Amino acid sequence: MNTNTPHSGSKSARPSGFSLTDWMPKIVLAPTMVIALVCIYGYMIWTAVLSFTNSRMLPSYNFVGWAQYERLFNNDRWMVALTNLGIFGSLFILICLFLGVMLAIFLDQKIRAEGVIRTIYLYPMAISFIVTGTAWKWLLNPTNGIQKLMIDMGFVNFKFDWLINPHMVVYCLVIAAVWQASGFVMALFLAGLRGVDGDLIKAAHLDGASTFTTYRRIILPSLKPVFFSALVILAHIAIKSFDLVQALTNGGPGYASDLPANFMYTYTFSRSQIGMGSASAMVMLGCILAILVPYLYSELRGERSEK
Amino acid sequence: MKKIALGLTAVALSLAATTSQAGQVEVLHWWTSGGEAAAIDVLKQEMKEQGDTWKDFAVAGGGGESAMTVLKSRAIAGNPPSAAQIKGPTIQEWGDLGFLENIDDVAKAGHWDKLLPPVVSKIMKYDGHYVAVPVNVHRVNWLWANPEVFRKAGASIPTTWDQFFVAADKIKKAGYIPLAHGGQAWQDATLFEAIALSEGTDFYKAAFVDLKDDALKGPKMVDALTKFKKMRQYVDPGFSGRDWNVATSMVINGKAAMQIMGDWAKGEFTAAGKRPGVDYVCLPAPGTSGQFTFNIDSLAMFKVSGKDTQKAQRDLARLVMEPKFQEVFNLKKGSIPVRLGMPRDKFDACADSSMDAFNAASATGDLVPSMAHGMAVNSMIQGAMFDVITNFFNSDSMTPEQAADKLARSVKAASM
């Protein structure tokens, strides 16, 4: 703020007052700002308002307080969706981080044909979740996928029917999502690893540290910012997951593999429960904020202390 | 060269049509698949002959969900189409919001009250006035069977659920899949609804139309749920998430013996070149021979302004109920005409028996709206029922008693 004061002071001292070059950036940015304000934040507020109304097929403004949230948390299907998000989100994030870091470290060993291998691992990220979901649906389907392959190969008792087992189906989502996203995490960490000062590693080796200790004690701790970025990106992929469920299981069997985004869509658009759908959307927003706010806080505080 | 000339004439003609101030009718629908699109083309042609222009507003996908989303935004913006493909209790919801046009004059001139069974005309009316016009009738409680599989397994085609279980065991032993089924909520509900109907029309109406609490958790519901759960062992392990037409093809190519599905399944058999009565048989679902669960598509009329537009809208309503359209459309779609007493010589054996059952059931009161297809209850309660039914079918720990209790509770919660 302080840096602006002398500038604006000098402007008011200038007799011409209005200069196009000063205003140009603001004018150019204005439409984007307006669109962002209305279409993102405006609709967020609208959804928040609707979540306190008894809106059904069309939005209405008959306020009912927290009743929709009460109904939401008494709804079995919502609790299933929320539990699934917990299982899916934590497993997806942990496994992706673990695999991503491992792949990045292995690729960092100056191996041959690294470019080719890196592309192969990163490629799933270029595919949409719909394609991933459909392909894994075929692979995991017990009558024509992996199970059938194993049985045809002679393992007659092989059983892999998670896709149709209500207790295990959520792990199918994890498998497909991890397959897609761990390459991306690998790319993030690989970039981070390349940025680590070579002298630091050499110094560690001179001090007699093994490769394992070097990674564990020196290199990985210096990649903390990368960890945070990966965590935030993965968490929001997990919370907004919709297309993967839609393509892989369509919420089934029953509604055992529903995630909150699917719940929100079903209730808002096909069951004429806009009020309850909005309430579920607000809970999802809350989940995202719970991750974003601490992250932004630490980021901004970091910036301030740097100054 | 000829093509270009033709194209130019078409352009010229369409220009002429727009300049002649003819009434325009905009119809929102999701009849977009092959047979359906051909069926709706008939109506387009007839409207053109009346001098009206047809503005197609087809929104494909999601069993009409996408179309409904578009319709809502158009209605909120104050610019609804002339007519939209809306059915069942949803007509009442739109009526409550004051969007629908009273077309009593067309209905009176066309004697709709005489032509339609009262159960059907009640659905087409809001507050005692006609606001929608029925297009076709689908019978939902059908059993499609492949007689070849039955012959090989030495089983006979069942007419009661007890016989069904006996036959299914034999078929399973012979190495075939007894029941072709797709694990999607609406298919689970279609199967369950057929079983529930066999517990009696009165029970069905009490539970799925009047939503009586004691029917929803009573002994008949528990019995129906028990039978329904038994079906789980007669489907193959890969049923989860399967589309209905894939399940039908399993019956067609002899992998599976039976499927419980509405008469739209016939289209799949016909497309595969199979003949009714020879390559496949259509029978009422076990235990429901005199009963008829209907799924009726209808066009609801929205309030529109402009004399020409209103005239075109009324032309549309009139034409839909005329015998010519009812016959051609339903022949293409695989359903039966909603008008009673139509000539039947062009319809096949399945449609013929469907029409017999429709007439008979409307006289005896055994004509009931399908819950699984959104004819009996609104989308909220339907959704709540779907959740319980499909969850119960897939759960390995829920007892039928618990499911019935849950059904009653979630219906109550959804109707709040």
Image (cartoon, rainbow, N blue to C red):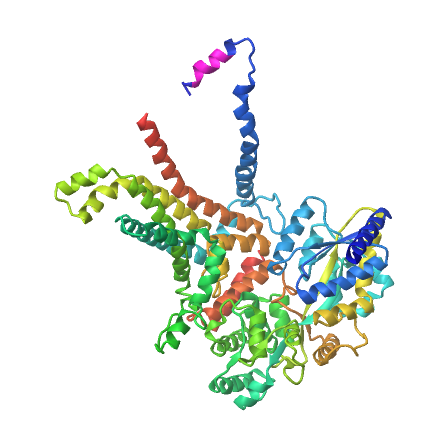
Nearest to the observer: residue B132 or residue B85: B85
The answer to whether residue B240 shows anywhere in this view is yes
Nearest to the observer: residue B92 or residue B32: B32
Q: Is residue B370 magenta?
A: no
- Residue located at (67% from left, 81% from top): B275
- B53 on left or right of B287: right
Q: Is residue A7 magenta?
A: yes
Q: Which residues are magenta?
A: A4-11
In the rendered image, the vertical position of residue A297 relative to residue B340, given as above or below: above
Q: Which secondary structure class fits the magenta region best? A: helix
- B370 on left or right of B246: right
Q: Position of residue B322 (x, y in %)?
A: 82, 66
- Residue located at (70% from left, 52% from top): B96
- A215 on left or right of B352: left
Residue B272 occupies which quadrant of the picture? bottom right
Q: Position of residue B354 (x, y in %)?
A: 71, 77
